[in-house]
Structure formats: structure tokens, C-alpha cells
Image (spheres, rainbow, N blue to C red):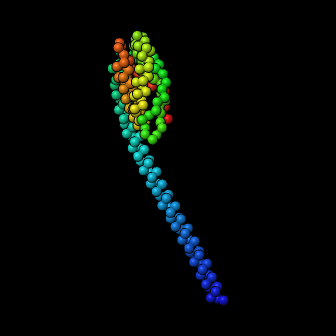
């Protein structure tokens, strides 16, 4: 009977060891998984910080360019820059050129002109102006429009397209009074 008890104790002991080995394997697997998640999070944070630094540097450059341009437009020290007639072009919802992603832009555009005759031209040719917006924005990707530079580039491209449509006068500025990318 003693041999049977020893044998049963040995089997129970081996079962405990097997259970502990399974638990240690599970614990090791969880530890490795945690390490992979931590390394992935650290890499993501590093890449995000680097990207934000680039965007901040480009935004600083853009602000510096804008500031230097504003100084040239001011008539006298301390005077306020003249604002022309603001004409609302309307609100636009345009799909972006992002394959696989269904993103769109919801924006409102207003134009600054110096003369009311330009407003009349814009009103008469409103369909062409709206088509220009939809054509331009619809050929942009999410990355093209994000950040200060992306929006500034879009304003410039719109102004060039709009001024090509006008026979007399020009558009002084293009304003994005609402801009949401969904």
C-alpha cells in the first residue's frame, strides 16, 4: 500500500508540476506580449513626436513668411490693413482623393475683392467658381490639406484659379471660414 501511495503522490506531484509549467508558459507569453505592446507604443510616440516637430517647424516658417508679407501690406506703422469687400462663395462638401478611405472636406469659402464689379463677375460665373473649388479639393488627399501649409497652398491655388476666371479685377484673398475633414 505504501507503493500505491507513493505512486499516487508522484502522479499528483507531476500534475502540479505540469500545471505550474503551463502557468509559467502563459505568464511568459503575456510578458512577451506586454513587451511587444510597450515597444510598439514607444515607436508610435517617437514617430508622432518627430512628425509634430516637422509640422511645427514648417508652421513656424509659414508664420514667418506670412508675418513678413503682412509688413509689406501695412500702409504706415500702426495703421490697420484695408479690407475689401468680402463675398461668400458658399459651403462645400467634397470627397477627398484617398483610395480606400472615405474622407471628405466640409468647408466654407469667402473671397475678398477690392471692387464691387468683381463681385458681380463672381456672381454671374458662380458655377465656374464652385466647379473650380470642387475640382481642386477633390484632387487633394488628406495629407495634402492637413497643417497650415496645406491650407495655405490650397488658398493660393484657389486664388490662381479664380483670378483666371475673371476678366476685370482680381481676388485679393481667399478665406477658409470653416474647414472640417471627416
- Outermost residue on the right side: it is 1
Q: Quick check: 30 left or right of 52?
A: right
Question: Residue at 34% across / 19% down in the picture?
Answer: 164
Residue 114, horizontal then vertical, whole percent = 39, 13
Q: Is residue 35 above or below residue 176?
A: below
Q: Is residue 144 visible?
A: yes
Look at the image and tell me in which quarter the N terminus lies. Answer: bottom right
Q: How many marks?
A: 0
State the residue in front, 79 or 180: 180
Instruction: Tell whether 68 sits left or right of 7.
Output: left
Name the residue located 52 percent from the left edge and 67 percent from the top edge: 25
Compared across the picture, whether 106 is left or right of 152 comes to right
Residue 109: image quadrant is: top left
Expressed as whole percent of the image width and height from the top left, the position of residue 173 reads 39, 20
What residue appears at the point 42 percent right and 29 percent down from the top-left corner?
Answer: 137
Q: Is residue 9 left or right of residue 84?
A: right
Which picture quadrant has residue 141?
top left
Foreground residue, 26 or 140? 140
- Residue 94 placement (x, y as % from top left): 46, 30
The answer to whether residue 119 is visible is: no
Residue at x-position 36% and y-position 35%: 58
Horizontal and vertical percent position of residue 176: 45, 25
**In this view, 130 is above or below 20:** above
Identify the image quadrant of residue 19.
Answer: bottom right
Amino acid at each position: 500500500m505504501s507503493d500505491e501511495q507513493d505512486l499516487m503522490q508522484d502522479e499528483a506531484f507531476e500534475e502540479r508540476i505540469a500545471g505550474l509549467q503551463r502557468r509559467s508558459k502563459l505568464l511568459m507569453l503575456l510578458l512577451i506580449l506586454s513587451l511587444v505592446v510597450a515597444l510598439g507604443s514607444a515607436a508610435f510616440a517617437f514617430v508622432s513626436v518627430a512628425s509634430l516637430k516637422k509640422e511645427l517647424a514648417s508652421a513656424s516658417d509659414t508664420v514667418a513668411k506670412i508675418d513678413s508679407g503682412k509688413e509689406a501690406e501695412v500702409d504706415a506703422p500702426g495703421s490697420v490693413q484695408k479690407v475689401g469687400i468680402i463675398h461668400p462663395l458658399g459651403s462645400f462638401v467634397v470627397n477627398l482623393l484617398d483610395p480606400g478611405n472615405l474622407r471628405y472636406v466640409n468647408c466654407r469659402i469667402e473671397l475678398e475683392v477690392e471692387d464691387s464689379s468683381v463681385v458681380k463677375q463672381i456672381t454671374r460665373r458662380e458655377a465656374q467658381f464652385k466647379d473650380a473649388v470642387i475640382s481642386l479639393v477633390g484632387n487633394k488627399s488628406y495629407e495634402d490639406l492637413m497643417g497650415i501649409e496645406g491650407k495655405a497652398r490650397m488658398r493660393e491655388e484657389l486664388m490662381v484659379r479664380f483670378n483666371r476666371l475673371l476678366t476685370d479685377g482680381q481676388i485679393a484673398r481667399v478665406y477658409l471660414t470653416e474647414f472640417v475633414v471627416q
